[in-house]
Amino acid sequence: MTRDARYDILFEPVKIGPVTAPNRFYQVPHCNGMGHRFPAALAAMRGIKAEGAWGVVCTEEVEIHPSTDISPHNEGRLWEDADIPYHAKACEAIHVHGALAGIELVHQGPASKNRLSRIPAMGPSHAAIGHTESLQARAMDKADIRALRGWYRDAALRARRAGYDIVYVYAGHDLSILQHFISRRWNQRMDEYGGSIENRARLMREVLEDTKEAVGDTCGIAVRFAVDELDGPDGITHDGDGRAVVELLADLPDLWDVNVSDWSNDSQTARFAPDEGYQDAYTSFVKEITEKPVVGVGRFNSVDAMVSRIRKGVLDLIGAARPSIADPFLPRKIEEGRIDEIRECIGCNICVTGDNFAVPIRCTQNPTMGEEWRRCWHPERIAPKTDDDPVLVIGAGPAGLECAMQFAKRGTHVTLAEATGELGGRARREAALPGLASYMRVHDYRVQHLKAQPHVEIYLESEMTPETVRELGIPHVFLATGARWRADGIGRQLRKPLDGLGAVPAYTPDDIMDGAALSGRVAVYDDDDYYMGGVLAEKLARDGCAVTLVTASPIVSPWTVETMEQHRVQARLMELGVELALNRRLVRMQSGGLRLACIHTGQEEDLEADATAMVTERIPADDLANALKGDAALNLQVIGDAFAPGHIAAAVYSGHLAARRHGEACEDMSIYRAERTQL
Ligand code: ADP
Ligand code: SF4
């Protein structure tokens, strides 16, 4: 197949100073939890992006000196010559496919906690830093500034020696000292680096000029700049200091990579920002000012949206972090006329959690992300089947669909049986909840593939029993029968059934997704801590219920901190009038409501409620698996939530792992290659 001529514009080369990007697909710098600790894994992951036809593939932020570290996070590191070979490995992996390699050099100034180095953080002015640590950054003097410029210059020279084609001067995400100098929130200096915007942008200009002078003859010099901090006039705004900086530096860099700050604003989840260009309102002015190419992001999944950005003159290059994570082969699929095969990002930010927990990146849609080296997984290729045995997959949720799809790709004959009349399992059910419509893409991508395969048979409304499984006579059976939320209150806070059950009608998320109509005063008890409790509170409030969200946590939906949306979840619930009963656990149900207790003092109080929504924990739906266990004629494997309830990403991964490893000599699914420090 060849590409649609309408998309030709996306495959035009773009000159970036002395180097030329082969097309307009630009993987902007993105964190990945691998950084300096997993260099082989990192190189393999970046190489896969280049193989997928991203014309430019960039690093994550790369720390230029020991005085800037955000340990335990695993960012890149280029402190000294000894770090060069690790970068050279990534550059080689990128270059082999004809892409350009870009590096985002950073000194994080007051964003560095320096837990590793124990060097006091520094910034434009004395300032308290971090949210939960009693730390301060010290104000830099002129000698510090001179030293900092030297570190940037040395790092740029090392970056060139490593093989990078594009070197970044980075001032974004509230993570770069260059941005901190520009932002009045951080900079209260009285010297030539403070005061007017010319003064506050001086350091950035100097570093930019130094970098150009050091490596600009052979490397493209990119500026990554947050044109708006979404923080009002006290910070950088796109019609204030942000615009002024672009005007001041206009054609000095070879490329502008523009976005909004901080990271939680730049990478908003689908729940709070729609796909396709939610940053346009802030960044579109940049092209009016500079002659140099501009790259921007906005969770671009649709090819038409990409083309329209170029044609309208808003962007020259289509920037992507998450779409390139969900589908490293997105550009190649467009090039080869296979756009219906694009694995679209669902905007869940599970990818961000890997970085937050300092472990390799993972992705809900792309189970191979982060596994390219340690498990040798390729996002598009899987080994052909090793025998002609057919397989039976029971349950068509995320785990079952992924398992069936990968077996289909291996050429195996697949029978997929689903009890209900529809495919998708929890992805479909949850997609009907407020803000989660994009979860349906977990179904869409897989089902379009499965339906196109002649060796796949799909049976709906086919609840399998031990008898029907045996009758079918298919030896390899993968049970992806999911899990059900429990209604008895058992969860993190309580390990025995709640006293007084039945005194108030209790509904699980499954009941509500199945259409149970709640009304009046509803208490949503969230002991799960991720999105479900908050989403149900939102739904019920929108349905007209008077909702109180009860949680033992001091904030609502606490795990959504890791997906960078907690503050938005809490604000939305408060705006919808949801009452918050924080730091509270359930004591019992009683006539007319619930008895709660403060988790700190134990002091009890009553909450009036006509109904409760219990969001606690889930029980695997493994009756079928248990009934079949021990049947010598069957080779059974339980996968997804039926094996261990978890996030959708975990279910997809489980389905993928099962299909990928089927037929291998090694039965131990947990084995992967580990990177070891050389002694
Ligand atoms: P996971 O996240 O692990 O994929 P889901 O709960 O999303 O789990 O999906 C499980 C799917 O399995 C649901 O669509 C459910 O209808 C289906 N299912 C459960 N039991 C059976 C069964 N006995 N036969 C066929 N399908 C089943
Ligand atoms: Fe997109 Fe979610 Fe994958 Fe991140 S984890 S790339 S947000 S689908």
Image (cartoon, rainbow, N blue to C red):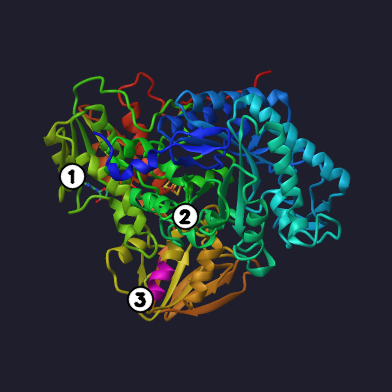
Q: Earlier in the sequence, mark 1 or mark 3?
A: 1
Q: At numbered mark 2, what does the secondary structure look like: helix, strand or loop?
A: loop
Q: Tell me where residue 591 appears, x and y as whole percent.
A: 42, 80
Q: Can you identify the residue that label 3 sits on? A: 543
Q: Can you identify the residue that label 2 sits on? A: 314
In the image, which disc is placed on residue 464? 1
Q: Earlier in the sequence, mark 1 or mark 2?
A: 2
Q: Indicate whether 132 appears above or below 524.
A: above
Q: Indicate whether 57 appears above or below 310.
A: above
158 to the left or right of 166: right
Is the residue under label 3 in contact with that under label 1 (CB below 8 Å)?
no
510 to the left or right of 283: left
The residue positioned 56% from the left and 42% from the top of the image is 31
The residue positioned 58% from the left and 75% from the top of the image is 604
Dot 3 amino acid type: Asp
Residue 10's quadrant in the figure? top left
Choose mark 3 or mark 2, whichever is in front.
2
- The foreground one among 466 and 365 is 365
Residue 286's quadrant in the figure? bottom right
Q: Is disc 3 surrounded by few (<14), some (14 to 19) or many (20+) residues within 10 Å?
A: few
Q: Which residues are magenta?
A: 536-542
Q: Is disc 1 surrounded by few (<14), some (14 to 19) or many (20+) residues within 10 Å?
A: some
Q: Is disc 2 surrounded by few (<14), some (14 to 19) or many (20+) residues within 10 Å?
A: some
